[in-house]
């Protein structure tokens, strides 16, 4: 599916995937380049996230929608909490991201990681460097919305669900968050993305609704996209805020985030989400309970 979609995009825009290996200003100015990049986001959404999640849900449960968590949350305040936690968590995530950027790796490993980081970041920076209101709207759709829906379907709806059944709720949350961060191949942003994955996993596990995690993920990405639109300097690798000035806001952010998460967990204990009905037990299935 992904290969077919890529071929169709190449035919429509006349742009080859090979041209994405080293994006520069001249290539970005090519007619159709932004269309191609957004089209690739859609292709990845369908081929890497939507279809595998649908197959997984049909394979492991008689109730695929409930398995994926496509239902209302057990408590209505989760809609509000999902937005609130993303807002108050942001200073802490930014601070941890700065610390992650300062990690020193051995020479050969560092060069490989930097190459992977640059390759993964070039496409995002190319999309966010467009500065019209139309571009902002399209970026929110093709970057924030598709990522928020697609990544949550796969990593929380399927992977976390399976791992939680096999190893327990918190093991499922942590392992799914680790895989969620690792697959981005952006090692200098691994830790903040891992922490974000944990929070999204908590939202899903204790609300029983993937819509809540999707909303939080979409809102967080949309915040960053809008901030980059307002202040393009945020796309630069160098931090525009000194590290020491970030310590106090990060500490306050962490304490407030922990408090909100505790509230969510305690409130959910009185009204826990329902588990989906699973397909018949198979002794050869590693995810059977």
Image: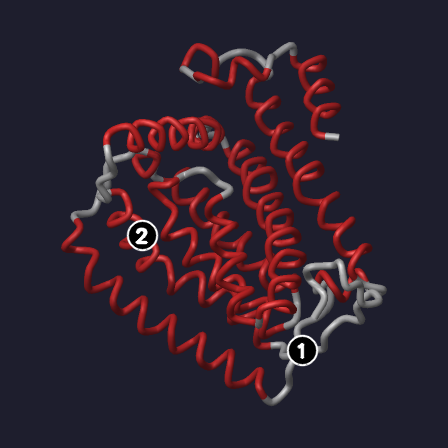
Residue depicted at x 45% and y 31%? 120
Q: Position of residue 82 (x, y in %)?
A: 52, 66
Q: What element carries label 2?
A: helix
**Image location (x, y in percent) of residue 252:** 27, 69
Q: Position of residue 181 (x, y in %)?
A: 46, 48
* Residue in the picture at 20% in, 47% down: 241
In the rendered image, the quadrant that contains the C terminus is bottom right
Q: How far across and how far down the image is residue 176, in percent? A: 54, 57
Q: In which quarter of the image is residue 163?
A: bottom right
Q: Which colour scheme is used?
A: secondary structure
Q: Residues within 10 Å of mark 2 (few under 14, many from 20)?
A: some
Residue beneath the point at 52% across and 67% down: 171
How many angstroms separate mark 1 from mark 2 (CA)?
Answer: 32 Å
Q: Are circles 1 and 2 on residues that touch, CB within 8 Å?
A: no
Q: Which residue lies furthest to the front in this view?
A: 283
Residue pushed farthest left?
Answer: 244
**Image check: 85 left or right of 155?**
left
Reading the image, the residue beneath label 2 is 94
Judged from the image, the secondary structure of the residue bearing numbered disc 1 is loop
The one of 247 and 275 positioned closer to us in this rendering: 275
Pick whichever of labels 1 and 2 is earlier in the sequence. 2
Seen in the image, is 221 located left or right of residue 271?
left
How crowded pointer 1 is (Cα within 10 Å; few <14, some 14-19, many 20+) is rated as some
- Please indicate whether residue 18 sits to the left or right of residue 258 in the image: right
Across the whole image, how many numbered discs are drawn on residues? 2
Q: Work out whether 82 lies above or below 99.
A: below
Which of the numbered marks, if any, corresponds to residue 195? none
Looking at the picture, does residue 182 appear above or below residue 213? above
Q: Mark 1 points at which residue?
A: 273
């Amino acid at each position: 599916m992904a290969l077919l979609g890529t071929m169709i995009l190449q035919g429509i825009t006349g742009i080859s995937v090979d041209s994405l290996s080293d994006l520069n200003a001249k290539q970005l100015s090519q007619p159709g380049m932004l269309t191609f990049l957004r089209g690739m986001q859609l292709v990845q959404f369908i081929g890497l996230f939507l279809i595998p999640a649908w197959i997984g849900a049909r394979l492991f449960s008689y109730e695929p929608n409930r398995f994926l968590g496509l239902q209302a949350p057990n408590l209505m305040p989760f809609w509000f909490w999902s937005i609130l936690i993303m807002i108050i968590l942001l200073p802490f995530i930014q601070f941890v991201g700065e610390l992650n950027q300062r990690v020193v790796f051995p020479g050969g490993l560092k060069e490989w990681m930097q190459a992977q980081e640059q390759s993964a970041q070039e496409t995002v920076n190319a999309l966010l460097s467009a500065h019209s209101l139309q571009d902002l709207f399209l970026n929110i759709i093709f970057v924030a919305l598709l990522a928020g829906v697609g990544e949550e379907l796969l990593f929380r709806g399927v992977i976390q669900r399976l791992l939680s059944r096999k190893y327990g709720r918190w093991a499922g949350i942590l392992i799914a968050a680790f895989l969620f961060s690792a697959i981005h191949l952006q090692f200098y942003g691994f830790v903040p993305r891992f922490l974000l994955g944990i929070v999204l996993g908590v939202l899903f596990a204790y609300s029983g609704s993937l819509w809540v995690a999707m909303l939080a993920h979409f809102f967080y990405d949309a915040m960053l996209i809008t901030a980059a639109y307002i202040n393009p300097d945020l796309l630069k690798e160098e931090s525009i805020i000194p590290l020491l000035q970030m310590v106090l806001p990060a500490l306050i952010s962490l304490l407030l985030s922990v408090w909100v998460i505790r509230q969510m967990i305690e409130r959910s204990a009185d009204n826990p989400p329902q588990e989906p009905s699973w397909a018949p037990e198979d002794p050869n299935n590693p995810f059977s309970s």
